[in-house]
Image (cartoon, rainbow, N blue to C red):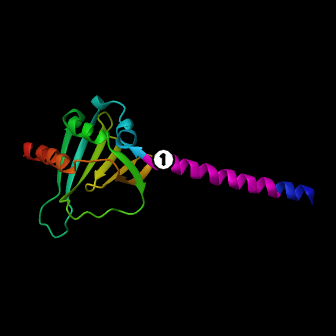
Amino acid sequence: MREQNRALMGGVIGVVVTVAAFAIYYFITLNTTFQKAVLDEVHNVDKAYLIIVRVPSSPETTEEIQTLRMDMDRFQDILNQLSILELQKISKPIKDKSSLYIYNIYVYEKSDHKEIVNFGVDNSKQISIGSTKGYQRYEVTSSFDYDTFRASVDKLFTDNQ
């Protein structure tokens, strides 16, 4: 009987410790920055390129999806703008009808064309990030000049036509 109680207590303690570890991990990773979540995944900018996909956010539009491939250095000013963003994990998407486009950016290794990380600037309030660690939606919790970001990316498309 005494050994059963010890085994039961050991099991209960194990479950409590496991739950506490997951809770601590969740709260530690609840907030992050764009720098940590995306840019730190790209270890050597010179050996990477990216593909930008501009998708109209309205299903009623007749505008086409546009793609653009470029080296990371041409996108560096925009990445610097994003690097200071503070992010918080969310589970439900944030709707923002004022955004005309969703910008999906995929970063690849030049040598083997393997995807390193991808992120989507869905609107002025939400960024989605995908990597080998998984996919996560984030709310932008710091100030974000979305209009400047959008204008900078749209200019890249205009310059390449």
In the image, what residue type sits under mark 1? Thr
Observer-nearest of 119 and 127: 127
Does the image show residue 71? Answer: no
Q: Give the residue displayed 17% in from the left and 57% down from the top.
A: 65
Q: Position of residue 138 (x, y in %)?
A: 37, 53
Q: Residue lying at the far right in this picture: please name it.
A: 1
Rendered image quadrant of residue 47:
top left
Q: Which residue, given by chain and number where applicable, does mark 1 sit on?
A: 29
Query: In this picture, which residue range is highlighted in magenta?
Result: 8-31
Q: Position of residue 75 (x, y in %)?
A: 21, 38
Q: Position of residue 11 (x, y in %)?
A: 76, 55
Magenta segment's dominant SS is helix
Q: Position of residue 29 (x, y in %)?
A: 48, 47
Disc 1 is placed on an element classified as loop
Observer-nearest of 160 and 32: 32
Does the image show residue 151? Answer: yes
